[in-house]
Image (spheres, grey):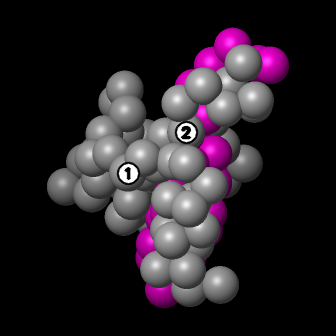
Amino acid sequence: MTPEEVAESMLKRGSTEVTEFKDLKVGSRVRRSAEQWGEAYTKGTGTIERIFHKQNSSWERKYGRPDVELIVKRDDGEYSYLADYHVDLAEVQS
């Protein structure tokens, strides 16, 4: 799916698009939590393009934390669609 199709799907399922959630903001440099080499920590491996929050979702009620999904454009040009808890901010934000 394209990023636009993913965004459309999230909106149709009741998510609201936001520009930030806690420390995560559109334009922030991030890395997947599993990416644990030096440059990934410092510079990140992608940039957040869109953030979606589905308030009061069944997932949110079950786990007691916000249901937040991200569209991240990776440095290799590919897109990742991730929950916020799967990413960490890069140490250096440009």
Does label 1 or label 2 sit earlier along the sequence?
Answer: 1
Please, is residue 86 above or below residue 44 in the view?
Answer: above
| Location of the N terminus (image quadrant) | bottom right
Q: Residue at x 37, y 26 (%)?
A: 22
Please, is residue 33 above or below residue 57 in the view?
Answer: below
Residue 18 figure quarter: top left
Other-residue count near label 2 (Cα within 10 Å), few / some / many at <14 / 14–19 / ≥20: some
Residue 66 part of the magenta segment: yes
Name the residue tied to disc 2: 54
Residue type indicated by callout 2: Lys
Q: Dot 2 lies on which element?
A: loop
The percent position of residue 12, horizontal first and vertical second, equals 56, 62
Please, is residue 10 above or below residue 84 in the view?
Answer: below
The percent position of residue 4, horizontal first and vertical second, equals 47, 80
What segment is highlighted magenta in the picture?
62-84
Residue 9 appears anywhere in the view? yes
| Location of the C terminus (image quadrant) | bottom left
Q: Residue at x 55, y 80 (%)?
A: 5
Residue 40 part of the magenta segment: no
Name the residue tied to disc 1: 17
Closer to the camera in the image, 22 or 90 = 22
